Amino acid sequence: TMKNFDKFQSNPAPATATRGPLYKQLSEEIGQLSQTLDRFRTPEAAGNESEIPLELEPTIERVVSLKDRLEKVRAKALETDPELQTYGPAMREKMLALYDSFLPLLEFAQTLQARYQPGWSAAQRALEEEAAPAQAAAA
């Protein structure tokens, strides 16, 4: 049992992870992502495509990855067979509302991703070009 304890100690949950019911986890994560992306809603705040804010790429990736989870939640909420239903009527409505509130955030994240994607590609190529001579020398 001590091995299992060590395993949990070496892989702690992220500091921003919310514990508790799924609805609470998802709604808090959507709130955090929304706050981060709200700073980029004006052209002045977004800057230009050559200056990619550091927190933007991982935030967009989190939004896009959250889409799959929320689509599964939505599918469970829309289940009509009483034997297969996961949520009661009240939670069903909350989950569907949460999904609906997520869609504008996803759309905005995809807009930002399209705006900055060429810069990300250029930045990635530059990093790879810098790393290539070091890798060749090490080989």
Image (spheres, rainbow, N blue to C red):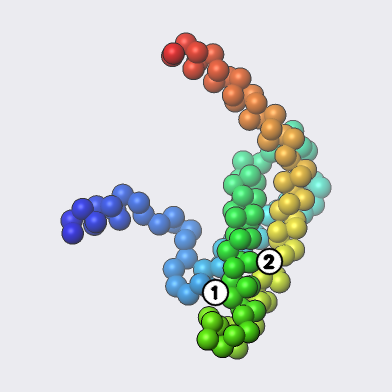
Secondary structure under the numbered disc 2 in the rendered image:
helix
Q: Kindly give the residue lying farthest to the top in the view shown.
A: 137
Amino acid type, label 1? Tyr
Residue positioned 60% across, 25% down in the render:
127
Q: Position of residue 104 (x, y in %)?
A: 74, 63
* Number of marks in the rendered image: 2
Q: Position of residue 113 (x, y in %)?
A: 72, 46
Residue 102 is tagged as 2
The quadrant in which the N terminus is found is bottom left
Count residues near mark 2 (Cα–Cα under 10 Å), then give few for <14, some for 14-19, many for 20+: many
Q: Is residue 2 above or below residue 138?
A: below
**Mark 2 / mark 1, whichever is N-terminal:** 1
Q: As drawn, is 36 to the left or to the right of 50?
A: left
Q: Kindly give the residue lying farthest to the right in the view shown.
A: 43
Residue 30 visible to an observer of this rendering = yes
Mark 1 = which residue? 23
Residue closer to the observer: 130 or 55: 130
Secondary structure under the numbered disc 1 in the rendered image:
helix
Amino acid type, label 2? Phe
The quadrant in which the C terminus is found is top left
